[in-house]
Image: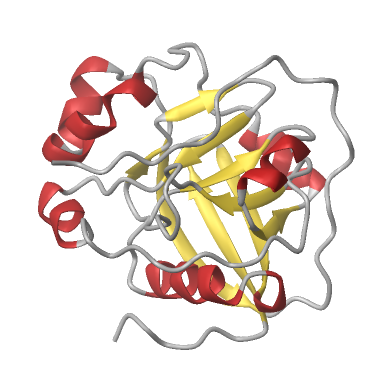
Amino acid sequence: MLKEKAPETFQVKFETTRGDFTMDATRAWAPIGVDRFYNLVKHHFFDNMVAYRVHAGFVVQFGISSYPAVSAAWRNSDIKDDPVTQSNKRGFVTFAQTPQPNSRSTQIFINFTDNSFLDSKGFAPFATVDPAGMKVVEMLYDQYGEQPTEEQDQISKLGKAYLDSKYPKLDVIKHATIVGGVAAATPAKPAAPKPKATAPVATKPQ
């Protein structure tokens, strides 16, 4: 059920506590990643999910389920790498991964600025958020810095309840829904230079 082939192009509407934005996915850019993304959305994986990493000038990252049992079920669900055909520019969406090959699973990130240094590290973009949507993405709460990022294992084990208790101001994705096709992806306008930051890493719960 979770291995259905995605359409060549499609849109996903994200409804958040800061407003709505839409991702335009293009299967030709990263077929394996887009198929995974399509199935996650279709089965409501991103619903009621916290955007736990919001690093201003770098990325917003999410993809750890709010429900520990779901995280446990996806623990060994890595997919193979796709070749990098697009650049990690502002508004482009990419799967997080560990330094190991074939380590993408369920976490994705949206680039706030030109992070093309990630291209050579194997991060393969598969979708874009348009300029209007990026204005919403940039409003997601970012004042906790990288602290939640360092607690991915705890988030996986304890779910949204843990984030609600320790980081109550983080924003939530209420729903993510496939809303239709897209003719062509439109990248967002370039942003100001970013501060140095570590790559979007998805840790593996023990």
The percent coordinates of residue 8 (x first, y second) are: 67, 84
Closer-to-camera residue (17/201): 201
Colour logic: secondary structure
Residue at 59%, 77% (x, y): give it. Answer: 31
Q: Residue furthest right?
A: 189
Work out whether residue 141 or residue 34 is closer to the camera in this orientation and state it.
34
Residue 197: image location, x then y, percent = 60, 20
Where is residue 5 drawn, in percent x and y? 49, 88
Q: Is residue 155 left or right of residue 130?
A: left
Q: Is residue 28 left or right of residue 185?
A: left
| Residue that appears at 60% across and 32% down | 59
Q: Quadrant of the C terminus?
A: top left
Q: Identify the image quadrant of residue 53.
A: top left
Residue at the image point whose x is 13% and y is 38% from the top: 157
The residue that appears at 30% across and 18% down in the rendered structure is: 167
Q: Nearer the viewer, residue 190 or 196?
A: 196
